[in-house]
Amino acid sequence: MLKAGVLGAGHLGKIHLRLLNQSKKYELVGFYDADAENAKRVVEEFGYTYFDSIEALIDAVDVVDIVTPTLSHYDCAKQAIKKGKHIFIEKPITNTVEEAEAIRTLVAEHGVKGQVGHVERFNPAFIAVKNKIENPMFIETHRLAEFNPRGTDVPVVLDLMIHDIDIILSVVQSPVKHVSASGVSVVSDTPDIANARIEFKNGCVANLTASRISLKNMRKTRFFQKDAYISVDFLEKKCEVVKMKDAPENPGDFDMILQNAEGVKKQIYFDNPEVSSNNAILDELETFADAINNNTKPIVTLHDGTEALRVATMIINQF
């Protein structure tokens, strides 16, 4: 079992602590949190071991799970990597692209592995359809959240939209050609609602909307490609695949047939895969353990995290 320690015991940090503690692939050694009062409460409530310094925790583990505020990701990762420790780092990977690239260089120099916490890659609805997404040419995403002051230290692009940016980059196998965006600050000092259009060199276009001042929560993405429409509801963990094929010469009474202006007939049919339930955060942590133990590539690499941050930064720079 890999010895793991968590840096940061806030809302998400506590979830990571609980899951690492129950995982059969990790031994949870303990945690560090800069807020001593919060750390004391966590110890009293859950009984986890508290380390009084980042250095002491790093020395005691094989894997450092970084769940601190984004501004400190780079410093935490740098300390861990220089001591030969593997790092799991929450999204966004760092505060700047330059910091992310520096981390990638350090990881290569010290022969350790890193994974970024883009948890939607492990969403069961996305897993169920990702192999059916082939060369999408238009993508539309809506990620809307009710207001929560916890995330307002960063723009909504880094807080919410970056999830969808990563998903899109994982399925569009083409470089980004152009980004345009607009954002509005409503209750925070940084934009609370944003819309972005990403154009890829292969002609694919992605239209993304993210808001943290909505009246209801929504996390939906739609992929349009040749002869198929794929919908993923990341919140409800549901998916729908609508496909088209050449219509049979003698369609059945219940077959859905479309005919275009040229007289070409297509049959519409549903190809909805089964969605298996899972714990996405536990899966991302445990697949990282597998990558370390088997010396394989993590599912969400530091490169992936860097590219998602690069596009997010391009969007923010439009505001």
Image: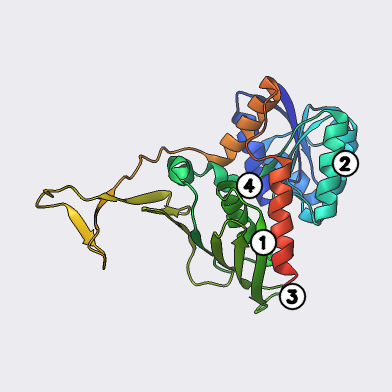
Q: Are marks 1 and 4 in contact (CB under 8 Å)?
A: no
Circle nearer the N terminus (3, 4):
4
Asked if residue 107 lies left or right of residue 130, the reply is: right
Q: Secondary structure at mark 4?
A: loop
Q: Residue at x 55, y 62 (%)?
A: 206
| Residue indicated by mark 4 | 118
- Could you say which quadrant of the image residue 70 lies in? bottom right
Marker disc for residue 177: 1
Q: Residue at x 48, y 43 (%)?
A: 130
Asked if residue 107 lies left or right of residue 92, the reply is: right
- Residue type, mark 4 in image: His
Circle nearer the N terminus (1, 3):
1
Marker disc for residue 78: 2
Q: Residues within 10 Å of mark 4 (few under 14, many from 20)?
A: many
x, y percentage for residue 41? 72, 46
In the image, residue 76 sits, relative to residue 5, either above or below, namely below
| Residue indicated by mark 3 | 189
Q: Which of labels 1 and 4 is toward the front?
A: 1
Q: Residue at x 43, y 41 (%)?
A: 128
Q: Between marks 2 and 1, how big is the CA–CA gap?
A: 32 Å
Q: Secondary structure at mark 1?
A: strand
Circle nearer the N terminus (2, 1):
2
Q: Between marks 1 and 4, how big is the CA–CA gap?
A: 23 Å
Q: Is residue 154 visible?
A: no
In the image, residue 109 sits, relative to residue 71, either above or below, namely above
Circle nearer the N terminus (3, 2):
2
- Residue type, mark 3 in image: Asp
- Of 204 and 304, nearer the camera is 204
Q: Between marks 2 and 4, how big is the CA–CA gap?
A: 20 Å
Q: Residues within 10 Å of mark 2 (few under 14, many from 20)?
A: some
